[in-house]
Amino acid sequence: MVFTQNILFIFLTTALFHFSMCNLISENEIIPQNETTGESILLGEISKPPLDRRTYLGVLLPNGMKVILVSDPNTTKAAAALSVSVGSINDPDDFLGMAHFLEHMLFLGSQKYRDENSFHKFISEHGKEMKVVEIDCSIFTQFGVLMI
């Protein structure tokens, strides 16, 4: 129950942060990448309250994805959240519902993982569930699993 509440808090906090940033995201934003080596770039530690004992680290992946890693050695569960900075507000007038379609496409499989339900199956087999929320300018998903 506490884990679910913590994940919900993290998920809602992330959603509120991104929702407040909707108008600040530029369509032409250039993300620095380490194209010469193809390696991730460490962005440094994330500021946090003094009583928060978890470790946070910002990373920029070679594909341009910004990641925040959170390490908590006292937990028995692992969780992740993903935000895609596109939502229904970005739908073209002649293709309304495109963001909702993208929401469903996020977990349909890939070249490496061809089974379109493999991700959902993995999550459900490890005792947790997945939530996906679409708002005007972002799509969020979060999931958690028991650590082995």
Image (spheres, rainbow, N blue to C red):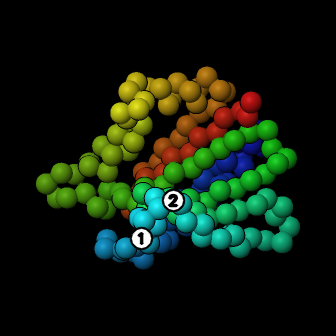
In the rendered image, the quadrant that contains the C terminus is top right
Q: Nearer the viewer, residue 15 or 85?
A: 85
Q: Residue furthest front?
A: 37
**Left or right: residue 101 compared with residue 146:** left
Picture residue at 74% right of the left edge, 70% below the top: 48
Camera sees residue 56: yes
**Tag 2: amino acid:** Glu
Q: Nearer the viewer, residue 115 or 141?
A: 115
- Tell me the tag on residue 39: 2
Disc 1 crowd rating (10 Å Cα; few below 14, some 14-19, many 20+) is few
Check disc 1 and report its element: helix, strand or loop: loop
Q: Quadrant of residue 143?
A: top right
Disc 2 crowd rating (10 Å Cα; few below 14, some 14-19, many 20+) is few
Q: Nearer the viewer, residue 148 or 130?
A: 148
For disc 1, the marked residue is 31
**Tag 1: amino acid:** Ile
Q: Check contact, mark 2 vs mark 1: CB within 8 A.
A: no
Picture residue at 39% right of the left edge, 42% below the top: 106
**Left or right: residue 71 compared with residue 109:** right
- As displayed, is residue 22 above or below residue 136? below
**Left or right: residue 33 compared with residue 142:** left
- As displayed, is residue 121 above or below residue 93? above
Picture residue at 85% right of the left edge, 47% below the top: 74
Pointer 2 or 1: first along the chain: 1
Check disc 2 and report its element: helix, strand or loop: loop
Q: Nearer the viewer, residue 42 or 6?
A: 42
